[in-house]
Amino acid sequence: MSAMPGNEQLWERSAGPEANGVPLADWWRRAAAMVIDTAVLWIPLMFATHSMGRPGRIGVGLVVGTVYFSLLNGSGRGQTLGKMVWNIRVRSAATGGPLGPAKAAVRYIVPAALASPIPILGLFVWLTDGLWPLWDRRRQALHDKVAGSVVVAAS
């Protein structure tokens, strides 16, 4: 006989937090999607910009990254290639609809501009921003708060 009423089990997961009726993405899915996006975007950029100086590499990286993340996260789908693999998407926190390219650009540029030019400070900014969803009740990173976005499960 079970001490749990009905069909409940100790290992069943309760419903997680939601945004506009859609479950928020787990942190590990966000992190795994970023690993894929990094491989897709930055590894080829390292080879393409290897002969440039540091300022040139940073500039090209900011421009290419801004275009990639703005167009894909800001689209109606709200998904980069990594987010497609892990079945998550970026949405407006206020409406639940698409974020739009301008806000998606802000979402990328704020942490990238802070992290790129100053190596030690950049690492601290990058780590803090990436880990923030672990303790935030809406699972938002700092760049999500700045852009007014959330990352949710794609249906």
Image: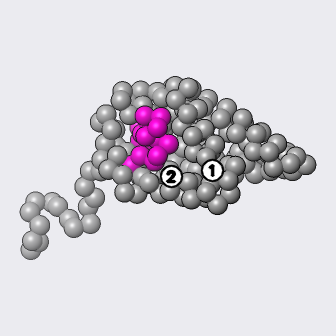
For mark 1, give the secondary structure. helix
Q: Position of residue 35 (x, y in %)?
A: 61, 54
In the rendered image, the vertical position of residue 66 relative to residue 30, given as above or below: above
Q: Which residue is mark 1?
A: 115
Q: Position of residue 30 (x, y in %)?
A: 50, 50
Give the magenta part as a residue range: 139-155
On the question of residue 135 being in view, the answer is: yes
Badge 2 amino acid: Asp
For the residue pair 18 and 14, the one nearer the viewer reads as 18
Q: Position of residue 15 (x, y in %)?
A: 26, 50
On the question of residue 35 being in view, the answer is: no
Residue at 86 percent across and 48 percent down: it is 53
Q: Which residue is mark 2?
A: 129
Number of the front mark, 2 or 1: 1
Q: Is residue 60 left or right of residue 6?
A: right
For mark 2, give the secondary structure. helix
Q: Are marks 2 and 1 in contact (CB under 8 Å)?
A: yes
The quadrant of the picture occupied by the N terminus is: bottom left
In the rendered image, the vertical position of residue 124 relative to residue 83, given as above or below: below
Q: Dot 2: few (<14), some (14–19), or many (≥20) neighbours within 10 Å?
A: some
Residue 27: within the magenta? no
